[in-house]
Image (cartoon, grey):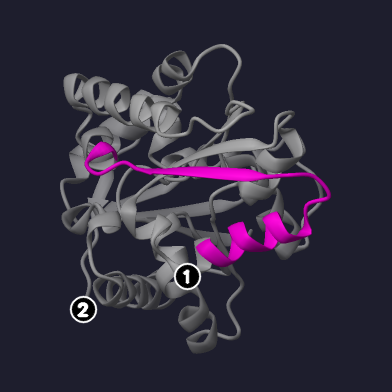
């Protein structure tokens, strides 16, 4: 049985874990939430990189992972290249805002992107966006909206704040993107955001399709591990670790994934 580490700044990566459990039911998962330091999107690149390296080393030493899914857009943007250099023998799958799938889905060619300020301000995001625009055979627009505080509100399951911030940022995105044609595709560029997907979809309007990264990342992980397509294996209960409050992670896993399992403290050397 393969063991895969799944790492995020908090509970947002559970949206990726949900897709991984469906795609790879016979795999053992160790989910590490660095909730004591969340959200990463409002921390410096140096802080994010340091935490990412420490937790990866812990998952290798203590849990013998065969691969790592970096289920955090900000950690991917700031740390994945150095992480791969430091661990050349470890398959590392990152997540990035799903700009390419969104471009393929969009009819109008105008795509909205909501993400943390750290992700949107990264060189990696700019390069991905610019490559797609340059290679597109038709006009393509990406309108981006940083969503300060939204990942943190989802992390805390603060429903009034999630509502208020979602209304504010979707309004700012749509009002600040008067270009014609209108936005018809919205990229959820943070793994926390799918847990507010129903609300975000309602606020965006019926003509807007939401796109996230969970399913593509799960398929890529299966391919990297060389495993066949999902069979009818019994899913293994993941090990949940949190640097913050383990009970909060367990509650989030129960609320969003239907998992009834305890979480443990993530104790780094």
In percent of width and height, residue 78 lies at 41, 71
The verdict on residue 144 being magenta is yes
Q: What residue range appears in magenta?
A: 126-150
Image quadrant where residue 248 sits: top left
Q: Which residue is mark 2?
A: 269
At x 32%, y 54%, the residue is 117
Quick check: is 130 in the magenta stretch?
yes
Q: Height in image: 266 above or below 195?
A: below
Let me know if residue 223 appears in the view. Answer: yes
Instruction: Say if 195 sits above or below 133 in the image.
Output: above
User: Taking 193 as reference, is 215 left or right?
Assistant: right
> How far across and down, in percent of the image, does residue 26 sit?
65, 46
Label 1 environment density (alpha carbons within 10 Å; few <14, some 14–19, many ≥20): few
Q: Secondary structure at mark 2?
A: loop
Q: Residue at the spot x=54%, y=53% of the render?
A: 28
- Residue receiving disc 1: 123
């Amino acid at each position: 049985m393969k063991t895969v580490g799944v790492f995020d700044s908090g509970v947002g990566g559970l949206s990726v874990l949900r897709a991984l459990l469906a795609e790879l039911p016979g795999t053992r998962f160790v989910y590490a939430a660095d909730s004591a330091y969340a959200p990463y999107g409002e921390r410096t690149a140096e802080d994010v990189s340091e935490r990412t390296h420490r937790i990866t080393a812990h998952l290798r030493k203590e849990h013998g992972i065969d691969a790592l899914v970096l289920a955090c857009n900000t950690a991917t943007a700031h740390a994945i290249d150095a992480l791969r250099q430091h661990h050349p023998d470890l398959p590392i799958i990152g997540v990035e805002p799903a700009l390419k799938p969104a471009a393929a889905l969009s009819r109008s060619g105008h795509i909205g992107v909501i993400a943390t300020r750290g992700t949107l301000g990264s060189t990696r995001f700019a390069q991905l966006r610019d490559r797609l625009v340059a290679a597109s055979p038709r006009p393509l627009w990406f309108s981006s909206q940083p969503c300060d505080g939204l990942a943190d509100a989802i992390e805390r399951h603060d429903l009034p704040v999630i509502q208020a911030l979602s209304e504010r940022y979707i309004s700012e995105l749509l009002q600040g993107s008067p270009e014609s044609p209108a936005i018809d595709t919205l990229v959820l560029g943070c793994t926390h955001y799918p847990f507010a997907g129903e609300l975000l979809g309602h606020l965006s309007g019926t003509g807007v399709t939401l796109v996230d990264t969970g399913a593509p990342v799960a398929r890529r992980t299966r391919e990297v591990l060389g495993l066949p397509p999902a069979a009818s294996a019994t899913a293994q209960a993941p090990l949940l670790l949190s640097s913050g409050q383990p009970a909060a992670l367990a509650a989030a896993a129960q609320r969003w994934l239907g998992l009834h399992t305890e979480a443990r403290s993530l104790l780094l050397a």
